Image (spheres, rainbow, N blue to C red):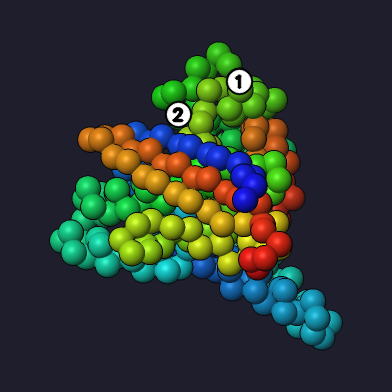
Amino acid sequence: MTILGIGIDILHLPRLRQVLLKHPERFLTRILTRSEQAEFRAIQAKAGGQIDHDKPVQFLGARWALKEACYKAVYPHHKLTWQDVTVIKENGKPALSIPEQARFGIGKSHVSVSHDGDYLIGQVLIESPSPSSH
Amino acid sequence: MFRAIRPASAIYRNHHNAVASALYRNAVVASPARTAFALNMTRSYASAGLSRENVEKRVLDILAGFNKVDSNKISLQANFNSDLGLDSLDTVEVVMAIEEEFSIEIPDKDADEIKSAAQAVEYVSKRDDAQ
């Protein structure tokens, strides 16, 4: 196994909340893929429809931080965009889905997220593609 | 007041632009008659050819609206990150503000290349649907 790169991103959630309140539609369509947008809306609905409730903000924050961390892990091998990466849950753990990873020349990914109050941190490790797995 | 009423009209104009540009794209591969029709449509909704000065002023005003930005450092050439101290979240916000201001949608790939006011002005000037 060869490591292609690691990336990390820390986020102050109140800032994210402010941007979200200023651009409630466009911010979501820019950062989140379609399936993530649907998840966001479901979480928002559960939170009484409030877009800036802690739950939807944390959901968006984790995706922001993980996509940023993933970008850093892969750069400059490839320049990822927001829509290239979807954050999914595998056995209760966050994971990345990168449908075009073969074309981008990247292998398996490993992720971790941590929260403390207003701060959230995301970390991503990307492997080089292994000859046996594609 | 002005700010408050802006988003509604921006959405309205966006809608028409989307229709016009979709027609335009279709028309390119279709008949000349349809092309002419689509061009007229585009012309009636977009004020084609905003002056360079106009675009520059509006882009610089957007930057001046960011509390974080030192107004003395604002210039066309200033890099959002290294000169103005904007991070990736701020930069995404700047690009969204530009989209709203000019009633355009900027695709991810293009948005990633906008790292200074000059680059934003360059991009907006190339978009003839910018208003």
Q: Do residues under tags 1 and 2 come within 8 Å of each other at their CB atoms?
A: no
Extreme residue in the right direction: B32
- Packing grade of label 2 (10 A; few <14, some 14-19, many >=20) is some
**What residue is drawn where x is 62% and y is 57%?**
A107
Q: Position of residue B95 (x, y in %)?
A: 55, 43
Extreme residue in the top direction: B72
**What residue is drawn where x is 48% and y is 37%?**
A8
**What residue is drawn where x is 82% and y is 86%?**
B31
Which element carries disc 1, helix, strand or loop? Answer: loop
Chain where mark 1 sits: B
The mark found on residue B83 in the picture is 1
- Packing grade of label 1 (10 A; few <14, some 14-19, many >=20) is some
**Residue B38 shows in the view:** no
Gap between marks 1 and 2, in whole Å?
14 Å
Badge 1 amino acid: Asp
Where B22 sits versus A27, above or below?
below
Q: Position of residue B50 (x, y in %)?
A: 69, 46
Which residue in the structure is indicated by mark 2?
A: B66
Where B74 sits versus B11, above or below?
above
Badge 2 amino acid: Phe
Q: Is residue A17 left or right of residue B66?
A: left
Where B65 sits versus B102, above or below?
above
Q: Is residue A111 left or right of residue A114?
A: right
Seen from the viewer's position, the closer of residues A41 and B45 is: A41
Seen from the viewer's position, the closer of residues B77 and B62 is: B77
Where A13 sits versus A59, above or below?
above
Q: Earlier in the sequence, mark 1 or mark 2?
A: 2
The mark found on residue A10 in the picture is none
